[in-house]
Image (tube, rainbow, N blue to C red):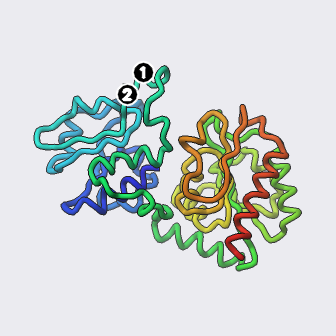
Amino acid sequence: MMLPALRALSRNSTEGFRLLVSPNKRESVFFEFEKQIELWTDYTSEGDYIFPSDENIRRASGGCDSLVNLCTWWNDFDSFMIDGITAYSVAETKFESYPSSLRTHDLLHAFENYFKVVNQIFETESIENYVAPVMLPSEAIGFAKSIKERLGTKIKLLGIHSYSRPDKTMTSCAFPTEINKFLVKNPDWVIVNLDPIKGTILDAVSREKVLRLYGRPLSYYLAMVNVCDAFIGVDSCFLHAADLARIPSVGLFSPTSPKIWGLKFSKGLNLCADSMSLFEGADINLALGSLMHEVNAQYC
C-alpha cells in the first residue's frame, strides 16, 4: 500500500531515489525499484526484530537530501536526525502507545496515509496519478499470461485468497459452499487459488475448476492477480494488489478495519463479520453477485 507514495517519491526526485529495505523484505512487492534498493540490517541473527541503528540509518541515507519514514508504527525517527538532511515521517505516535491510543492517521485509508508524506514534499501531487498494477519480473508476467492464453478468451478467472495470519484467515464453512454453487451456475469461470499452502478452506472448493500455484514465488501469485477478471480475499497484499489494478473485488474483513485497509480504487465492496468463521452464505452470495455485476458492466 506504500507503492503509490514510493512511485511519486521516485519519479519526482530528480537527483535520485534510494529505497531502504530490511533484508527480510527483499522478496516483497518492491520489484519496480530493484535498482534503487539499499539493504539495512535490522534483524538479529536469530531473526528477532530490532530498530535500525543510528549507524545503519546514517550509512544508508548518506548523500541524500531528504529522509522519509513510511513505517507507521515507528516514531523513533527523531533520534536519527542528520545534519543537512530534511526528515519526513508518516508516524504520529510511539509504537509502545499504539494499542491504547487512536492515531490521527488511523482515521485515514492506508493508501492516503502513506501518500500524505508525499504531499508534505510535493504539495500538488495526486495519488490517482500513481495507481497502477504492481510491476513484476518478466518471468512472472509471462507465467500468468501463458495460463490466461491457454484457457482462452471464453474463460474468466476469479482470484481467491483466504489465508493470512490466524485471525484474518477465512474459516467460515459457508465460503467454499457458496464458491462451489457459483461455479455450477457460472461454468465459464475458473478459480485461481492464491493461498500459498495446502490445508486452507479453499481445499473444499471443487478441484476440477481450481488452478493452484503451490510453491511459486510471491511475484507469480501477484502476476496471477493482475490477469484475474475478479478477486475476492481477506485483508492482505493480494487484495491491495487487486485494488491497485482496479480489478472488481470483494474484501473480507473481521479483525481489521475496511475503512483503513479496504478497497479504495477498484469497484466492489468490503464484507465484514464479527469473526472470520461467522461469514454467512447469504452475504457471500451477495458479494459474488456484486462482483458479477461489475465484471459484466466492464464487458458491455
Q: Which residue is mark 2?
A: 93
Asked if residue 259 is positioned above or below residue 146 in the image, the reply reads above
Q: For the residue carrying disc 2, how many other residues have a C-alpha within 10 Å: few (<14), some (14-19), or many (20+)? A: some
User: Helix, strand, or loop for circle 1?
Assistant: helix
Q: Position of residue 179 (x, y in %)?
A: 81, 54
Q: Is residue 46 visible?
A: no
Q: x%, y% of residue 92?
A: 36, 31
Label 2 sits on what residue type? Thr
Task: Name the element at disc 2.
Answer: loop
* Outermost residue toward the front in this view: 124
Identify the residue at image location x=83%, y=57%. Answer: 206
- Rendered view: 79 above or below 60: above
**Residue 251, x across and y down, in percent:** 65, 48
Task: Residue 188: give x, y in percent of width and height.
Answer: 80, 71
Give me the residue at 45% from left, 47% from top.
112
Task: Report the amino acid beneath label 1.
Answer: Ser
Q: Quadrant of the C terminus?
A: bottom right
* Residue name at image x 40 percent, y 37 percent: 72
Relative to residue 247, is residue 36 drawn left or right? left
The one of 103 and 13 positioned closer to us in this rendering: 103
Q: In the shown orientation, is residue 39 left or right of residue 223?
A: left
Frontmost residue, 58 versus 67: 67
Q: Could you say which disc has been placed on residue 97 in the image?
A: 1
Q: Are marks 1 and 2 in contact (CB under 8 Å)?
A: yes
Residue 177, can we see it? yes
